[in-house]
Image (cartoon, rainbow, N blue to C red):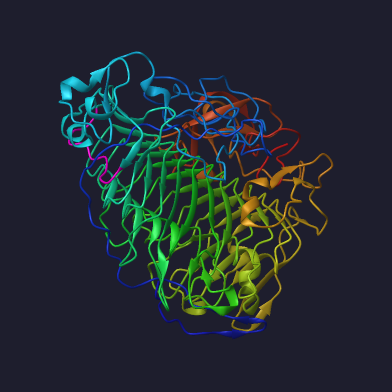
Amino acid sequence: MTRRTIATWIVVLLAAACGGKSGNRTAGQDGGGGAVGAGGSSVVANPDAGPGGQPGSGGIMSMGGTGRATGVGGAGGVDAPAATDGAAGVPGQGGRGGADAPLATGGTAGATGVPFVDAAVQGTRACEQGEAVYWVSPTGAAAWASCKSATPLADAVACAIATANQSAAAGDTVCLRGGTYGTGIAPRNDGAEAARLTFAGYAGEDAKFTGAITGIKLTGRAYVTVDAVNVDGAKVFADLIGAHHVWILNSKLVNSSDTGGWPVGVRMYNDAHHNRLAGCTIGNSGYMTSDDDKGGVMNLGNWENATDSTGRNLIEQCHFYHGGHHIIEVASSYNIIRNNAFHNENWTACARDSTNNLCGNRDLIVSRDQLNANWNVFEGNRIAFSGASIDDLVGSTGLSVRSPHTIVRNNMFYGTDGAGLGLYVDSSETYDARSTYVYHNVFYRNGISPLSADDLRYTFGLTFDNVAGTRAPIPITGCAVKNNLFFGNAGGDIFFYYTDAAAQSVGGNYYAVVKGSNQTGMVSVTLPPDNVQSSADPLFADVASAFTVDNLERFDFRLQAGSPAIDRGVFLTTTTAGGSGTVIPVADPSYFIDGFGIVPGDEIQLEGQSATARIVSIDYAGKQLTLDRTLTYAAGNGVTMKYSGPAPDIGAFER
């Protein structure tokens, strides 16, 4: 996107590049309904294949399913059946959990479960239970009452999608037979909390929607599930504008046909809330002009609408790729984006010889003012292989944070053209990166683009990027950077550009090089002694694969025995008084969440104790955590996420 012009400061070894965003951002056109295809089969990865996935801190809760058959998934996957709390294991790469699994209340958060290589959509088994459901086919012609059957119907004896869109209501299940459809899913009615309206691909068949304006149109809808469909070639993959409690599961949403204006593949804004995307493959929306980047794969909130109250949405276990200006732009609050894989390497045609006439861009951006883009959580994601936009002089960051109170934890940043993570402000008052909490991440081989070499700060793993210098109205302060593992980044590990390192809380990081600069040139930065400065190999389990996007899922950042990062982390915060009970006073509760009403709260553990407790609510102003069980503590006890050994490990995974 066209950048705002910002004055350039010349410093030793640095030339400050501009950031920001402007220009015309026209939303895609709404689409109408259309025919639904016959079912397909859900993507099921080999649960024993590949390196380990993301361990959570004691388990994560599925938002449930339709209450039908449990899908096949990797050990401890997000939709695994209910399990008791247990140690966070490191399972195999694992398939996605079944979309219709029962609500999980605990257990270990499992593998990433997102295969990089796209598989055919293979539908769900929701239509194979012997109960009466409604059947739809590409050539369906039956009346609504006639296409309800406990055995599969096909061809003309099934209904048309237009009939299902008009007639399906709360509690109905619409089973989609295989075939190609030129118009999309667009139900007229809502489901209900206890009786969801479900459109599901039939197992073993591919319900493919192509050529429609909108593949899945759920504008204003509530309690609707779309499971195991294939949208390929629509202008808008899915429209959830104003929707709530809508789930899109195990589906493939790819290849936007919109090559003009500002394409958006998945639109979730204008008061959209409590929606869920899980187990999906979503990508290829956006393009480059001669001097600009356009569009993205998904918008979570409307960047141009200051009154948009979108929030409390869950995006998990998906594979996202190839956007114009971004893959996902987050411009709303209280969203959780976890256990996904992102890459936006140079993929689309552009006029730049130095990148072989291909451009890409950042993976993720959080960008709105401090009023309506707070408290977003990015956890357990692979954020990798970002490219370089046609309008950038340097490579793009993996994640650009431009709003306050963002939590970035347990992610793996690697192979990004620019910095893996950039905390960004400029001379406007729109961008505000204060109070960003960055902990237990891995930053490996970032800043690798030859373009980034022209500007040292963009060759680092983590960059505090105050491009406005001394003119920034909102300097970057109050951030926490703890227990992150930096290794092999092209220029260094942490860069403080026109940012005071002493104004942040920095501890427990494994790093080799930290630098800073201001109007006087390069400045020396010394981190507190509880950080580990070392260039020794941290002994990742397996990073030997060729360093390309084709091997995205092969990199295993667990720690081997003997790693110098084991038990070297710090506790995130401390208790401020002694006592016993379910309410604990802490110095800084902002490391933690109570789940925002969409997932369970964080599982925490006190220094020197093996017992853990789940957070049920947080008083951020009063600095208190309310737990689901009683703990006894002394003043000054360390408080952190669940761990083993005498202290937390450094990095994204606890050994």
- In this view, the residue in front, 348 or 653, is 348
Q: Can residue 238 be seen in this view?
A: yes
Say which quadrant the C terminus sits in.
top right
Horizontal side, residue 135 vs residue 300: left or right: left
- In this view, the residue in front, 487 or 33, is 33
- In this view, the residue in front, 412 or 449, is 449
| Placement of 15 over or under 319, stated as above or below | below
Q: Which residue is drawn at 36% across and 24% down?
A: 66
Horizontal side, residue 184 vs residue 340: left or right: left
In magenta segment, residue 270 = no
Q: Residue at x 76, y 56 (%)?
A: 529
Horizontal side, residue 20 vs residue 117: left or right: left
Magenta region's main secondary structure? loop
Where does the image place residue 348, in percent across and percent down from the top left? 48, 66
Say which quadrant the N terminus sits in.
bottom left
Q: Can residue 274 be seen in this view?
A: no
Q: Quadrant of residue 443?
A: bottom right
Tell how many labels. 0
Where does the image place residue 242, in percent across and percent down from the top left? 25, 45
Q: Which residue is drawn at 62% across and 24% down?
A: 86
Where does the image place residue 15, in percent across and percent down from the top left? 59, 82
Q: Give the range drawn in magenta.
A: 181-191
Q: In which quarter of the image is residue 536?
A: bottom right
Where does the image place residue 134, in percent across and percent down from the top left? 25, 23
| Placement of 645 over or under 318, stated as above or below | above
| Placement of 494 over or under 125, stated as above or below | below
- In this view, the residue in front, 152 or 492, is 152
